[in-house]
Amino acid sequence: MKKIIPLFLTGILIFAFLAGCEKQKPNIEPEYEKYSYSFLNAFDTLTQIVGYTKSEEEFNNYVKKIENRFYELHKLYDKYNDYEGINNIKTINDNAGVKPVEVDDEIIDLILFSKKMYEEVNHKTDIAMGSVLKIWHNYREEGESDPANAKIPPMEELIKASEHMDLDNVIVDIENRTVYLNDPLMSLDVGSVAKGYATELAIDEAVKDGFTSGIISAGGNVKTFGKPMDGIRERWGVGIQDPDKFRFSDNSLLDTIYINDASVVASGDYERFYIVGDRVLHHLIDPDTLMPGDYFRAVTLVTEDSGEADFLSTTVFLMPYEEGRELVESMDGVEALWIFKDGTVEATDGMKQIMKSQGATGATAQ
């Protein structure tokens, strides 16, 4: 989190609480009030929640459960740290080529979800890329701490590591609840999907508990449920970040989209990166080239499921525009917006229908 502005800057996406009809007099039902809460460190980011409930106590009960759930899932999906009494992604990686590891259902389900999406949509988002992503992570950290000596990983090192990223070697035994990596030099990295998947799990549980109106942003992974209970709006507004203004302007919105019961996730080249000479090297690595994706500044995905949106945002970011658009338009309930390197913006027809620049507002339901 670089800064917080009144619209709640959340990395690539912004909560844009815009009514689209500000002159109307609010007609809030007396039993509902708006409350907000935020917490740090789960998934190494700032998570913000805004919701409408009948009392502050009710709101606090919901958000504390969400917070606790996020920390639980953070530990399970962590590839860097051990936790007492928990077998997590790091445990699986540490036992690669050694033995199957018994894990919680949340890990089994995440891996199966990721494998299914990998096969169905495109082979660009691969949780078995840990060996390659670890190299890029190390070079990025070194480049950030010592910019004068920043380096690009040697291609021969990346190619050698890529020999150990076969998703078929991730063996899931559902009956015995184990995961085994059938290659001692491979490792899992679920960073491309875990935060969105965790957001979907936590909010689904909160909604089942009775939380009926809210919006959450987990470091830019936005999920909305219900409608804003302010008597004005029928839809939540979510701002799309202008990559060129991300670090330099409080007026950094490119556009605003209006949604209910949907997720918005963006992938871009301008939040996590380091510089080598005149090259900006971001963290979204193409499994085919083993280099950062080079088609766009950012891609924003809208779909109902936050885990799917997270997975697809990376996938589409790493695909040529024509192929990515064809993929998005082949999927029900999925919309996308592309920001090209020259600033050109393209969007699916369904995305245009919910964009402020195309006449959409939060005042009416879709």
Image (cartoon, rainbow, N blue to C red):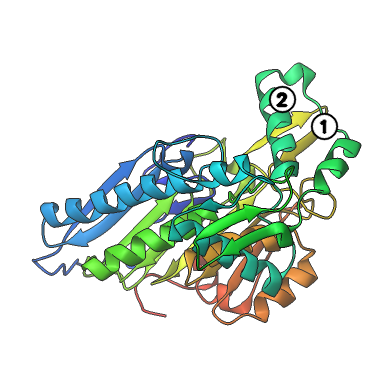
Q: Could you say which is closer to the camera, residue 357 or residue 206?
A: 206
Of 351 and 255, the residue lying toward us:
351
Quarter assignment of residue 143:
top right
Residue 74 in the image: above or below residue 142: below
Decide: few, some or many residues near mark 1? Use Cα within 10 Å; few <14, some 14-19, many ≥20: some
Q: CA distance from mark 2 to mark 1?
A: 9 Å
Q: Give the quadrant of the C terminus.
A: bottom left
User: What residue is pinned by disc 2?
Assistant: 143
Give whichever of 110, 349 is nearer the camera. Answer: 110
Query: Is 320 on the left-hand or right-hand side of 339?
Result: right
* Residue in the picture at 62% in, 78% down: 349
Q: Give the percent coordinates (x, y) of residue 17.
A: 35, 57
Where disc 1 sits, the SS reads loop
Compare marks 2 and 1 and give the one earlier in the sequence. 2
Whether residue 239 can be seen here: no
Asked where in the image residue 313 lies, by quadrant, the reply is bottom right
Residue at 11% from the left image edge and 52% from the top image edge: 57
| Amino acid type assigned to the residue bearing label 2 in the image | Gly
Please name the residue that numbered disc 1 is placed on. 152
The disc placed on residue 35 is none
What crowding class fits label 2: few (fewer than 14 Cα within 10 Å), some (14-19), or many (20 or more)?
some
**Horizontally, is 91 left or right of 361 in the view?**
right
Q: Position of residue 348 (x, y in %)?
A: 64, 74
Closer-to-camera residue (37/33): 37
User: Can you say whether 196 is above or below 360 in the image?
Assistant: above
Kindly identify the amino acid type of the residue bearing the numbered disc 1.
Ile
x, y (%) of residue 142? 70, 23
Inspect this view and state whether residue 282 appears: yes
Residue 283 vertical placement versus 33 (above, below): above
Name the residue at 34% across, 51% down. 69
Q: Position of residue 101 (x, y in %)?
A: 54, 50
Query: In the image, what residue occupies the spot 35% across and 66% down?
Result: 204
